[in-house]
Amino acid sequence: MNITLLGCGRWGSFIAWYLDHNKNNVTVWGRKNDPLVESLFATRVNTYVTFPDSIELTNDLVYAVKKSDIIIISISSQFVRDLMSNVCKIDGYKSKTFVLCMKGIEDSTGKRLSEVLEEFGVPSENIAVWVGPGHIQEFTRGVPNCMIIDSKNKDLSSYLVDIFKSDLIKYYQGNDLIGTEIGAAAKNVLGIAAGMLDGLGCTVLKGALMARGTHEVARLMKACGGSEMSAYGLCHLGDFEATLFSPHSHNRMFGEKFVKGEPFEKLAEGVATASAMLKMAEKYKVDLPITKAVNDIIQHKKDPKFVLDSLFARNNKKEF
């Protein structure tokens, strides 16, 4: 199978490496004049994987899209619109299968990423998402995990599960694209919250964060038209548990370092996603206290301990 990977960060590079090992013909596209892309293309080495000669590397977006029927996108969520503004100029792009491998919501609009692709004319039946728990450092050591592929087109998700499956990753077929996208994105926000608790010396509160945070996300899923049960599956709770105590999670580490006043230079998708989720919450009239707390600390520079105390000072209420 010919598969093109748009984006070659740490997760995108792993996907390319994984699919090549799964006996697919893989082409990786990266932007010109990007130092990280240039380094990868020159050495064929990312931090965690080494590309074999069988993986083709290119800066030519037109060539990369036209070559394959399956186009996997793995870039920062906030740049999907910019990428699609160029992809939509390529003849035949609407007939391609697009698989989104990012966990985020567009901050400027509060839209799910599949909705952004639909804005550019990609038929909904040609769009799938690939999310779930797992860290590259563990996968490359041969530690298996489970992930989920979801789409409005159930035949497509079943087809992709069959193509992508291996002994390393067991895939489940989702049946709630709205919930899957929201849950995967929200995991990063709660991952930041978990890191903040670590940084404040309140690690014991992670149990409460997991329980209440998942319930919060379930409310948002339901209000947006998805199934609240998706919050308790692989797209959210399963992935969140893999993040909660992990030294590999960028979002957890960002949260810890942020409350300690230490720099963190790597991408933490949850920063923009917290703001985007609050836009969704306003639209659908949903209360997201933990998400708001994370956003207040990061964007409004509120004192982390004050915000945490404020969460505990909320009025008494029934758990469910």
Image (cartoon, rainbow, N blue to C red):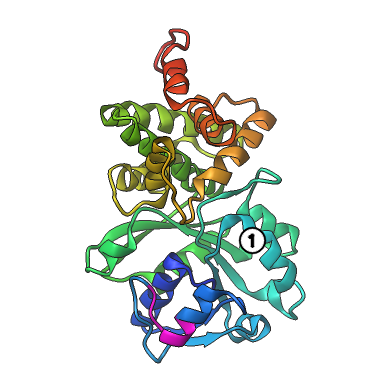
Quadrant housing the C terminus: top left
Is residue 124 something one can see in this rendering? no
Front residue of this view, candidates 67 and 243: 243
**Where does the image place residue 244, in percent across and percent down from the top left?**
32, 42
Q: Residues within 10 Å of mark 1 (few under 14, many from 20)?
A: some
Whole-percent x and y of residue 230? 45, 41
Whether residue 213 is visible here, answered yes or no, is yes
Q: Amino acid at mark 1?
A: Val
- Magenta span includes 44: yes
Q: Residue furthest top?
A: 316
Question: What residue range appears in magenta?
Answer: 40-46
What percent of the width, then of the height, locates residue 191?
40, 42
Tell me the residue at 58%/79% (across/down).
69
Q: How many marks?
A: 1
Q: Residue at x 75, y 64 (%)?
A: 121
Asked if the stretch drawn in magenta spans residue 233, the answer is no
**Residue visible at 59% across and 68% down?**
98
From what the image shows, is residue 86 above or below residue 53?
above
The residue closer to the viewer here, 73 or 58, is 58
In the displayed structure, would residue 291 be above or below residue 58?
A: above
Q: Secondary structure under badge 1?
A: helix
- Provide residue 115's location: percent of width, then percent of height: 67, 53
Q: Is residue 68 above or below residue 300?
A: below
Foreground residue, 288 or 22?
288
113 sits left or right of 254 in the view: right
Observer-nearest residue: 238 or 186?
186
Q: Is residue 311 left or right of residue 170?
A: right
**Residue at coordinates 50% horizontally, 61% vertically from top-left?**
101
In the picture as drawn, the residue positioned furthest to the bottom comes out as 53
Q: Label 1 belongs to which residue? A: 80
